[in-house]
Image (cartoon, grey):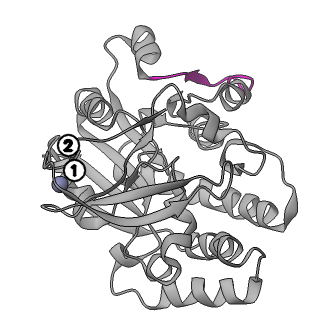
Amino acid sequence: MLKTIEFCPVCKSKNFNPFLVCKDYTVTNESFTIVSCQSCGFKFTSPRPTNDTIGAYYKSETYISHSNTSKGLVAKLYKAIRTYTLKKKLALVNANVPRGTILDYGCGTGMFLKTCQDNQWKAFGTEPDNDARNLASQQGLNVFSDKDRLQTYITNEQFDAITLWHVLEHVTDLDETLTFFKTRLKTNGVLIIAIPNHKSYDALHYGSSWAAYDVPRHIYHFEPATIQKALANYGFVLKQMKPMKFDSFYVSLLSEKYRTGKINYWRAFITGLKSNLKVKDAGDYSSVIYIFKQK
Ligand SMILES: [Zn+2]
């Protein structure tokens, strides 16, 4: 079951052009179309699976962001870098807001949440995947299946920080989710969003084979201009952009595999390196961390 998105989630326009046709390389091999809004340029996967059918597209052993297994070199590398980036992520949050209450939206197995909790943050998470959520709960973390469940528990709580590490591109109900952030973030709180950037060098290099299109799990495909427009509708202003320098390498490795059927480490490394070297500012990287505050 697929659902066509009728209005641009950013500007409400009804007119779109086809942008790319991409394959689901990790689970089904089905093809999905990404469209581009004629008035604001926002890109999104449409038609896309419905909320009831999207779960099936996450059923893969290789979908490693939800599991703690480390099979294969790519997964091992991913894990080593993740350990390093966990510390960097915590430092970034701490640099932008005094320690208080944090919500990690789409927390996966809870690795970042645990890092926060171990550093005296009062930590909450949401995670729709049952297996990932159970792993997080087993570590003594407060994790809920979705924001509605969370809200029955926290009632009036507001957050000093809300983080989404490669999550916003997956959410099926973008409007509801951003409204939730607007109401639940403290006036001086910080909203930190990490997402792939389809305007990066590696995205343009790999085209429809770019691993970070990851259809149909990625519904929304942002770049600096469209994320800022999307967030402005909910009263958020961009304070800062930060690069995620490892992502170009990881995404290039997967993209090489998708394009040629096998991993070419050298070529992926060169593309990843080029992607990082060709940037003019933080908004040009393969993945970007956006730091938003309320207007
Ligand atoms: Zn639009």
**Residue at the image position 48 percent from the left and 45 percent from the top:** 167
Observer-side mark, 2 or 1, equals 2
Point out the quarter of the image occupied by ligand 1: bottom left
Please name the residue that numbered disc 2 is placed on: 7
| 27 or 237, nearer to the observer | 27
Q: Eyeballing the image, is 54 above or below 268?
A: above
The disc labelled 1 sits on which kind of residue? Ala
Please name the residue that numbered disc 1 is placed on: 230
The image position of residue 285, as x and y in percent, is 43, 75
Q: How crowded is mark 2: few (under 14 residues within 10 Å), some or many (20 or more)?
A: few
**Would you say the magenta stretch is mainly helix, strand or loop?**
loop
Magenta span contains residue 144? yes
Q: How crowded is mark 1: few (under 14 residues within 10 Å), some or many (20 or more)?
A: some
Magenta range is 137-146
**Residue at the image position 42 percent from the left and 77 percent from the top:** 200
Circle nearer the N terminus (2, 1): 2
Question: Mark 2: is the Cβ under 8 angstroms from ligand 1?
Answer: no
The residue tagged with tag 2: helix, strand or loop? loop
Q: Can residue 118 be seen in this view?
A: no
The image position of residue 257, as x and y in percent, is 71, 73
- Please state the total of marks drawn on the protein image: 2
Q: Distance between the residues labelled 2 and 1?
A: 13 Å
The image position of residue 280, as x and y in percent, is 33, 87
In this picture, residue 186 sits left or right of residue 204 = left
In this picture, residue 252 sits left or right of residue 277 = right
Badges 2 and 1: C-beta atoms under 8 Å apart? no
The disc labelled 2 sits on which kind of residue? Phe
The image position of residue 131, as x and y in percent, is 72, 28
Q: Eyeballing the image, is 287 above or below 192?
A: below
Q: Eyeballing the image, is 104 above or below 267?
A: above
| 1 or 274, nearer to the observer | 1
